[in-house]
Amino acid sequence: MEKIAYVYDELHGYVKLAGVFSDIVSTRVFQRLRRIRQLPFAWYVYPGATHTRFSHSLGSMYIAGLIAQRLSEEGFMTKDDVLLVKVSALLHDIAHAPYSHSLEPLLMELWGREWGDLVEAVVTQDPELNEVMRKHGIDANEVVSILRGKSGSSLLNDMVSSDIDVDRLDYLPRDAYHTGVAYGRIDLHRLVSFLSPGSSGIVVPLKALNALESFYVARLHMYKAVYYHKTITGYQILLRNVYSELMKYRELGDLLETYMNFSGILKAIREGVYHLWDDSLVSGLLNVALARRVLSPAVEDLASKLLSRRGYKAVVNDVRMCWSEREIVTRARELEAFVESEVSLVPPKVALFVETLPVYSTERPARVLVGGEERGVVEVEESIMRYMPPCVCFVRLYALPEYEEEVRSALAKFFKH
């Protein structure tokens, strides 16, 4: 008799785990996600935001199951497709680094790799996970192709990797719940009930347009209020600066060596020890470094600032909707020129942050079914999305607290002239 377990989720209620799903969740590499928090340093602004990638992955699988089961009953998906898309949704975050998006930009630069390469390595080469998938007849390479949005089924691709995929459908309401940000909530039930297969992936019927628009607006607000909040982003930058320094110390480098290059990571995956690389390892090394006083005074000061919430202050915080990255290039160059010519401070005492994020994909926004014709949501006459710029743009200049007034004063003089 098949063993069935139920996990109570704060958003979706009881999530059923049986068969391959129960076995995947029991692997060490998946249990690791309990120790990878969803929103690094969001707890410095929203104290409740300490939830993990584990719960989000279960939630994504649950939503995928709701959509896939309905489409299967309507004859659009086979049982094998349902199984495959649920497994893919469950594993979509399996490779996230400690502190997720805080460290990943640094690591990708160091390794010269795309994040999808690490996802593929974990899914196809972790020995315990692979044994589970082989036991249940799951092709790891098919899972990878769906996660990369390159499988032969545009429907499966869209469900797991698109503008309105199960990842976003779970993390927006989940992150809103844990931060308490009300405008991150979406009409999940209506979207799940009406997402349908189109000629090349998922479409939304016109009667669910309001729910789709609300989804995009929620995404915009969450970018501004949570994911790229000026304080949260400041601490993520500070962690990258500290971590890059930690790797230079022999006392710590021996412990971090495995994770300093992609070949080391691959070795850890193949040997089944990737699961040890989690938030606790990074924070523990930071505590050890401070306790043993092995860091230089400057790096020790940065690490102490990180732990005691005395980090960067945003002396410039330029956030705007924009049609393209070109709209913020001038502002970014002005600040670069200011830092180079007017202050004697260099990173990490100051930090420039420039980022352009898509609210919706300009190449492939969600499609709406209007009178039998599929249109991008920005092409639907009655949609507010026609008038919304596709990007939110951030240009920020950060300074450590002791240099804040100096930078503000120099900044005022610079732009006055």
Image: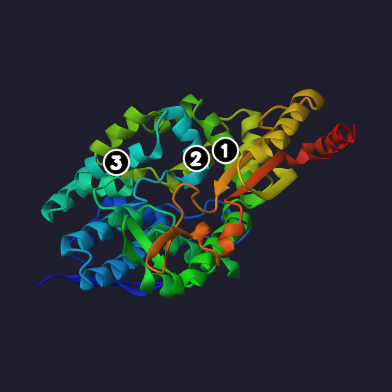
From the image, tell me which residue sits under label 2.
103
Query: According to the image, label 3 marks what residue?
Result: 120
Type of amino acid under label 1: Leu
**Between residues 173 and 152, which one lies in front from this camera angle?**
152
172 horizontally vs 410: left or right? left
Judge by depth and name the residue closer to the eye, 146 or 261. 146
Whether tag 2 and tag 3 are in contact, CB under 8 A, the answer is no
Q: Which mark is residue 290?
A: 1
Horizontal and vertical percent position of residue 236 = 58, 44
- Residue positioned 29% across, 49% down in the render: 146
Identify the image quadrant of the C terminus.
top right
In this rendering, which labeled residue sits more in front, label 2 or label 3?
3
Tell me: 342 left or right of 240. right
**Crowding near the residue tagged with mark 1, few <14, some 14–19, many ≥20 C-alpha atoms within 10 Å:** some
Point out residue 350 in the picture as x, y percentages from the top left corner. 70, 34
Type of amino acid at the residue the image marks with label 3: Glu
Q: Position of residue 56 (x, y in %)?
A: 40, 61
Marked residue nearer the N-terminal end (1 or 3): 3
Please tell me how crowded label 3 is: few (under 14), some (14-19), or many (20+) other residues with Cα within 10 Å. many
For the residue marked with disc 2, what is the amino acid?
Leu
Q: Mark 1 and mark 3: span between their CA atoms?
A: 35 Å
Mark 2 residue element: loop
Q: Nearer the viewer, residue 200 or 62?
A: 200
